[in-house]
Image: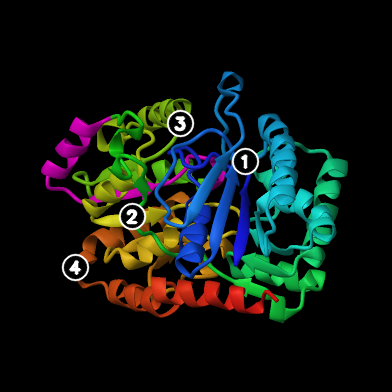
Amino acid sequence: MKALVVAPQPFFTPRGTPLSVYYRTLVTAQLGVDVDLLTYGQGYDVDIPGVRIIRIPKFAFLGSVKVGPSLLKLFLDALLTLWTIALALKHRYDFVHAHEEAVFWCWPLKPLFGFRLVYDMHSSLPQQLTNFRFTTSQALIGVFGWLERVSLRKADAVITICPDLRDYALAVGIERQRLLLIENSIFDEVRVNGGGQSRADLVDVEGDDAVDRIIASGGPVVAYAGTFEPYQGLDLLLSAFVHVLKHRPDARLLLIGGTPGQVREKRRLAARFGIENACVLTGQVSKTRAKELTARANVLVSPRIEGTNTPLKIYEQLASGKPLVATRIWSHTQVLNDEVCILVEPEPRAMADGLLKAIAEEARLPHVERARALYELAYSRPAYEAKLRRLLEILP
């Protein structure tokens, strides 16, 4: 069986690293599929046996591809469309695995080339336009909504990454037999071609000495790792930490991720709150480095305040063996419950109380073992492989 994976993302970079694409492609190849992966020019090539990575030109002078919708991505997607057609003319693919907006140009090509189509729906694209503040035009949002609904109906199989998207697809009219819920729930080590494991030197790390100092201080360390987009709730977290320090002045906050501009903004906010000496912001680091840093923390936190997709990091946090504090919003509660973590309302005092509880009861919280058990049962690698094997079975 031969497949074309079309991934309109910078594969593979620390900023916006498409781990979901990586793991889908990795496991699909391990299940015996011969895979071509078509993606943007920016990024590091990673070692995926059985996968040929094909890139469009970088156009580096146009700048880096950022997370979320952009005019640059629109231009690059037009080129991806041409490359998709060229590859379909050259090869006979049994199926095309289209990630995100790639499905918009893949479904019109489906009857021309006779391939089966898999739509990997990581998010609702009309919702992205709003979440990333790309546009307020209801006409444009409506066009994307129409494209999304047509794509769902045209696909032979649809993958969603969380129950919210699954329910949306069902509401559009997708039959259950061609709809799979495959969460982005595994986190094997990524291997960069020529460099062994994914390296911490992919970007300069800010604050290594400061990290060592807060760990050596002996106080409890609360860690967040992820993007610094507004919906992630970092302002809420910083505000909550003001209250945490009143009761635990030895506590420290470790924020991992963020562009240089976002890091500067959060440092200014921490200074305005008067907690800058208790906070360390590392900037963007590789996945390996982020994992090393969170392993040194006492408590993990996900302060997200809006959105409906379950964050990928939640699954790694479940398996971490550390207490997790998360906001009680649908994005989290699709997976999390009060048995496996400390859920709090998305406001500063409730977040502070949750963090203080996790710090005080870290060693004896029953949540940790329940979280690990949930991960092993529903989201571990064997469970993930079984779901992708099911995908291959339902494609004629």
Above or below residue 209? Residue 363 is below
Q: Quadrant of residue 273?
A: top left
Q: Which tag is nearer the camera, tag 4 or tag 3?
A: 3
Q: Amino acid at mark 2?
A: Glu
* Element on which disc 4 rests: helix
* Element on which disc 2 rests: loop
Q: Which tag is nearer the camera, tag 2 or tag 3?
A: 2
Q: Which residue is labeled 1 in the image?
A: 68
Q: CA distance from mark 4 to mark 3?
A: 34 Å
Q: Which residue is labeled 4 in the image?
A: 363
Q: Marks 3 and 2: in contact by CB < 8 Å? A: no
Q: CA distance from mark 1 to mark 3?
A: 14 Å
Residue that appears at 52% across and 33% down? 42
Q: Which tag is nearer the camera, tag 2 or tag 4?
A: 2
Mark 1 crowd level (few <14, some 14–19, many ≥20, 10 Å Cα): some
Residue that appears at 27% across and 66% down? 321
Mark 2 crowd level (few <14, some 14–19, many ≥20, 10 Å Cα): few
Q: Which residues are magenta?
A: 207-231
Is residue 28 shown in magenta?
no
